């Protein structure tokens, strides 16, 4: 990587049914290089796959970086930039006093972000899905391809 250690990440996740077979994808750009990542789960939800895409991308980075994440998921962006502070303050309970859904992945995402704070942190950007953003559209293709590759005998664990 260059001296700036800046990484731009595009993420997406989705399911065939919700819950159902799911896939996640991320595209990382750094120092003139591009890397595509994707994965799948036999039984999961859209929101879990959106979270998983960001987590997997951040955990792939071998050292602290200044990161920009682009997502078409309002759940992911609002969750990490707004809602999570109250969830933590309320012992991982929502305003309605219910347990926060996907708490395991939210906690893992927080840990993945923490690694990058000294390098400038992680900035979150929302992009309209299924629009004119080529990298968002490519992530959508990768995530859908991963979800469609799940089979009944797939040894992958469930996420639900």
Image (cartoon, grey):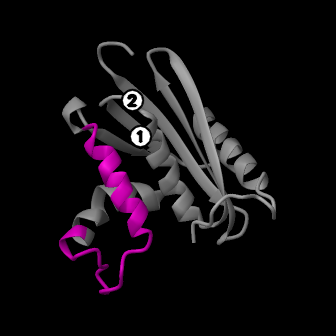
Q: Quadrant of residue 81?
A: bottom left
Residue carrying label 1: 58
Q: Position of residue 140 (x, y in %)?
A: 65, 46
Cα–Cα span, label 1 and label 2: 9 Å
What x and y, as percent, mark residue 89?
A: 18, 71
Regarding residue 131, the answer to whether it shows in the image is: no
In the drawing, what numbered circle is on residue 62?
2
Tag nearer the camera, 1 or 2: 2
Residue at the extreme front:
155
Q: Is residue 150 left or right of residue 120?
A: right
The 10 Å Cα crowd at callout 1, few under 14, some 14 to 19, many 20 or more, is many
Above or below residue 128? Residue 78 is: below
**Residue 23 magenta-highlighted:** no
**Left or right of 53: which side holds 131?**
right
Question: Residues in magenta?
Answer: 88-116
Quadrant location of the C terminus?
Answer: bottom right
x and y percent of residue 128 in the render?
Answer: 54, 48
- Of 73 and 147, nearer the camera is 147
**Callout 2 environment at 10 Å: few (<14), some (14 to 19), or many (20+)?**
few
Q: What residue is drawn where x is 73% and y is 63%?
A: 16
Give the farthest residue toward the bottom: 97
- Residue at position x 65%, y 72% in the image: 19
Residue lying at 44% horizontally and 15% vertically, measured from the top left: 31
Helix, strand or loop under label 1: helix
- Say which quarter of the image contains residue 142: top right
157 relative to 57, above or below: below
Q: Quadrant of residue 59?
A: top left
The tag on residue 26 is: none
Residue drawn at x 59%, y 53% is 13
The N terminus: image quadrant: top left
């Amino acid at each position: 990587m260059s001296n700036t250690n800046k990484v731009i990440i595009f993420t997406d996740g989705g399911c065939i049914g919700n819950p159902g077979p799911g896939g996640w994808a991320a595209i990382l750009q750094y120092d003139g290089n591009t890397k595509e990542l994707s994965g799948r789960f036999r039984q999961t939800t859209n929101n879990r796959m959106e979270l998983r895409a960001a987590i997997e991308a951040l955990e792939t980075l071998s050292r602290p970086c200044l990161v920009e994440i682009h997502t078409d998921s309002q759940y992911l962006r609002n969750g990490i930039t707004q809602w999570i502070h109250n969830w933590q303050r309320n012992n991982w309970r929502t305003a309605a006093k219910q347990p926060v859904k996907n708490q395991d992945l939210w906690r893992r995402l927080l840990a993945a972000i923490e690694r990058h704070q000294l390098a400038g942190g992680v900035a979150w950007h929302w992009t309209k899905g299924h629009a004119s953003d080529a990298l968002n559209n490519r992530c959508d293709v990768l995530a859908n391809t991963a979800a469609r590759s799940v089979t009944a005998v797939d040894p992958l664990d469930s996420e639900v």
